Image (cartoon, rainbow, N blue to C red):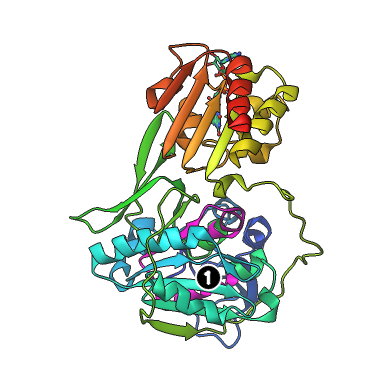
Amino acid sequence: MQEPLIIYEEKCTGCGACVKVCPFSALSVEPREGRTLPESRFRNIAVVNEACTACGACLPSCKFDALEVRDIEQKGSEDLESFTGVWIFAEQRAGEIQDVAYELLAEGRKLADELGEELSAVLMGFNIRDKAQTLIEWGADKVYVVDGAELEEYETDLYTDILAALIHRYKPEIVLAGATSIGRAFIARVAVRVKTGLTADCTALAIDPEKRILLQTRPAFGGNIMATIITPNHRPQMATVRHKVFKKGAPQPGRTGQIIEEHPKLSLARTKVVEVLHEMGNQVNLAEADIIVSGGRGLGGPENFAMLEELAKELGAAVGASRAAVDAGWMPAYHQVGQTGKTVCPKLYVACGISGAIQHLAGMSSSDYIVAINKDPDAPIFDIADFGIVGDVFEVVPMMTKVLREG
Ligand SMILES: Cc1cc2nc3c(=O)[nH]c(=O)nc-3n(C[C@H](O)[C@H](O)[C@H](O)COP(=O)(O)OP(=O)(O)OC[C@H]3O[C@@H](n4cnc5c(N)ncnc54)[C@H](O)[C@@H]3O)c2cc1C
């Protein structure tokens, strides 16, 4: 791929003004000597590296008109055809493949089959080689494995270096990752590194049958519209998807595929993990819970979440909250369900004193069964509830807990 910045060698004086303003450290000044360049009375010349994002910040700094950003359409379209295959980033934590990876494999399999191409997974970590076969059984045709002691804990720089290097080398057409804390931390950097776009938090993915490009759908304008985003001029087409947006498939024991061990050159990590603290302690993890009891502004105050916790205990449920309850400081942010909170897909979701704003629904509407308790019969939550109870949470919730407790 050509660098997106053109440096006119006959005009450049090697003054270094562009180097100072580049926000990505993508420019340096080097001696002309030993290079086959047009004759010049200047000893140095500016050189661009692969960190260049074509942002154009350097252009005004050049008094000699020696810089130009290459036409994006032209740059992008020159070798689109050479990118093939669908990739998913197979996130693991402490050596355990995360469910979001299986969900991406199920969705990636559909996309790859529609394109008639291969589905590959990228797995990085320490002592994780033996997990590659599991990914094949869940749908991958190939697994690229990077296994090393440096990768024992997640590290943004290393993950970015590795995935960007693999993309440069193998040129996948589509790259999908989970919108988890790890995915969010490094995937955008990879997209910048490989000079392509990224659509975060997609809620649906599809292939345009005519153009064979990825249709990336996500909520926009505060969740009021669904936008379908495309990446027509650059590759790979990159998207992140939250946990539980797609359903897992089923493994096929004994399925065969190719495992490719990679040893990319790693830069030194700039950070070091000192200690890993588990925020949730022993509580039920919201994203994994089969039953969730959630509370909203209708609970009236933080003390009333104790009432929900009692119901949750009887049901073996996790406790969730609307953003209104979180913003009011009644519940910690990791309990928030919705567009800017967690996406959940439990078997049963009990919404207590929650109105059903579109941003809340974005995080829970795919629950198998929804029970809503609200004193307003016109509350929008009743539009999607399977069972609606018009009543006061302070009467209904303790009654439910009592019935469950006493059988
Ligand atoms: C960009 C953006 C992102 C957002 N992200 C999220 C998100 O991730 N998650 C989220 O939840 N929201 C999110 N919101 C906020 C969202 O728009 C709503 O403001 C929020 O969901 C409302 O929370 P609520 O239903 O608890 O409160 P309200 O809308 O105030 O509803 C309270 C409900 O409780 C009922 N009620 C009151 N007292 C009782 C009682 N005693 N018994 C029974 N019912 C009672 C009322 O009838 C009412 O329906 C986002 C908003 C924006 C703009």
Is residue 39 visible to the viewer in this orientation of the structure? no
Mark 1 lies on residue = 163
Q: Residue at x 41, y 51 (%)?
A: 246
| Image-based side of 98 in relation to 115, left or right | right
Q: Residues within 10 Å of mark 1 (few under 14, many from 20)?
A: many
Indicate the position of residue 283 as horizontal and vertical percent values.
Answer: 69, 46
Q: Give the camera-side residue of 53 and 90.
A: 90
* Element on which disc 1 rests: helix
Is residue 194 visible to the viewer in this orientation of the structure? yes
Q: Give the camera-side residue of 56 and 360.
A: 360
Indicate the position of residue 294 as horizontal and vertical percent values.
Answer: 58, 31
Residue occupying the far front of the picture: 407
| Image-based side of 401 in relation to 210, left or right | right
Q: Residue at x 64, y 71 (%)?
A: 29
Q: Which residues are magenta?
A: 161-187
Quarter of the image for residue 403 reads: top right
Quarter of the image for residue 380 reads: top left
Location of the N terminus (image quadrant): bottom left
Type of the residue with mark 1 = Leu
Q: Is residue 171 magenta?
A: yes
Q: Eyeballing the image, is 51 above or below 266?
A: above
Indicate the position of residue 155 as horizontal and vertical percent values.
Answer: 67, 66
Residue occupying the far bottom of the picture: 34
Q: Quadrant of ligand 1?
A: top right
Q: Eyeballing the image, is 361 above or below 1?
A: above
Location of the C terminus (image quadrant): top right
- What is the total number of numbered labels drawn onto the structure image? 1
Q: Is residue 27 magenta?
A: no
Indicate the position of residue 42 as horizontal and vertical percent values.
Answer: 62, 74
